[in-house]
Image (spheres, rainbow, N blue to C red):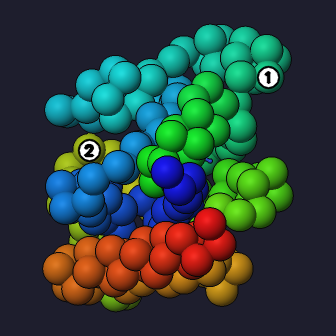
Amino acid sequence: MSKGVVFIVSGPSGVGKGTILGQVFSRLDNCWFSVSATTRDPREGEAHGVHYYFLTREEFIKQIEQDEFLEYAEYVGNYYGTPRSTITEHVEAGYNVFLDIEVQGSEQVCRKMPEAVSIFIIPPSIEALAERLRGRNTDSEEKIRARIKRAEEEIALAPNYDYTVVNDDLETAVNEVLAIIEYERSLRWNED
Ligand code: 5GP
C-alpha cells in the first residue's frame, strides 16, 4: 500500500478552512484530521477531542516541556499545537493527514517534514473575511480586529505555500483542494 501524504492547510481565521475540509472528508476516503490542542475557550458546538483538545495554559505549557508537540504557536493570545502522537503512523498506514494550522506552525512542520504539501486558503477580500468573522458571533470586536490584523500579516505569507486557493465559491474551492490532493497522491504513486 502506498504511504499517505501530509497536507498543511493554513489561512486566516474565518476563511472557511473547516468547512472546506469537512467537504473534502465527506468525499474522500483515507483522510485523517490531526486534532490540535488549544488554550482558547470552546465555541458553541465544539467538542473536546473532536475539534480541539481544550487545555488550560498550565496543561499546555507542561506538554511543551514534555516535548509533546510537533509544532506549536501563539495566535491572538492563545496557544495552539499539533500533538506528535500518531501522524507518522497514519501516513505509514496510507492516510492523507490534514493539519489545520497557522503560518508559524506551518513553517515548523515544513522544516521537520519537507515532504508535506502546504495549501493556503485566501478570502476573496479582507472585507469578506471581516464580515464572516462578525457573522460568526463568537468573538468580541477587539478579538475580531486582532484576527483581521493577523489575517493581513498571514496573507502576505501565502506565496511561501505550495498552493493557494481562493475561497470565494465554496464548491470551486473544495474542487480545487480535491484536485491538489489527487495530483500530489499521483506523484507518490509514480514513485512507488
Ligand atoms: P481558531 O481559534 O479560529 O479555531 O484557530 C485560530 C488559528 O489557529 C487558525 O488559523 C488555525 O488554523 C490555527 N491552529 C489551529 N490548530 C493549530 C495548531 O495545532 N497549531 C498551529 N500552529 N495553529 C493552529
Horizontal placement of 137 versus 15: left or right?
left
Q: Secondary structure at mark 2?
A: loop
Precedes in sequence: disc 1 or disc 2: 1
Q: Nearer the viewer, residue 4 or 75?
A: 4
Q: Position of residue 89 (x, y in %)?
A: 58, 34
**How many angstroms separate mark 1 from mark 2 (CA)?**
32 Å
The reply to whether residue 55 is visible in this rendering is: yes
Amino acid identity at mark 2: Thr
Residue at image point 81% right, 17% down: 65
Quarter of image, res 46: top left
User: Mark 2 CB in 8 Å range of ligand 1?
Assistant: no
The reply to whether residue 78 is visible in this rendering is: no
Horizontal placement of 155 versus 108: left or right?
left
Q: Nearer the viewer, residue 138 or 20?
A: 20
Q: Nearer the viewer, mark 1 or mark 2?
A: 1
Amino acid identity at mark 1: Asp
Horizontal placement of 45 versus 77: left or right?
left
Q: Position of residue 109 (x, y in %)?
A: 72, 53
Q: CB under 8 Å between callouts 1 and 2?
A: no
Q: Secondary structure at mark 1?
A: loop
Q: Of the numbered discs in the image, which one, if any, rests on residue 6?
A: none
Near mark 2 (Cα within 10 A), the count class, few <14, some 14-19 or many ≥20, is few
Name the residue tied to disc 2.
Answer: 138
Residue at image point 54% right, 71% down: 189
Residue at image point 44% right, 22% down: 54
Relative to residue 89, is residue 17 depicted above or below?
below
Name the residue tied to disc 1.
Answer: 67
Relative to residue 115, is residue 25 depicted above or below?
above
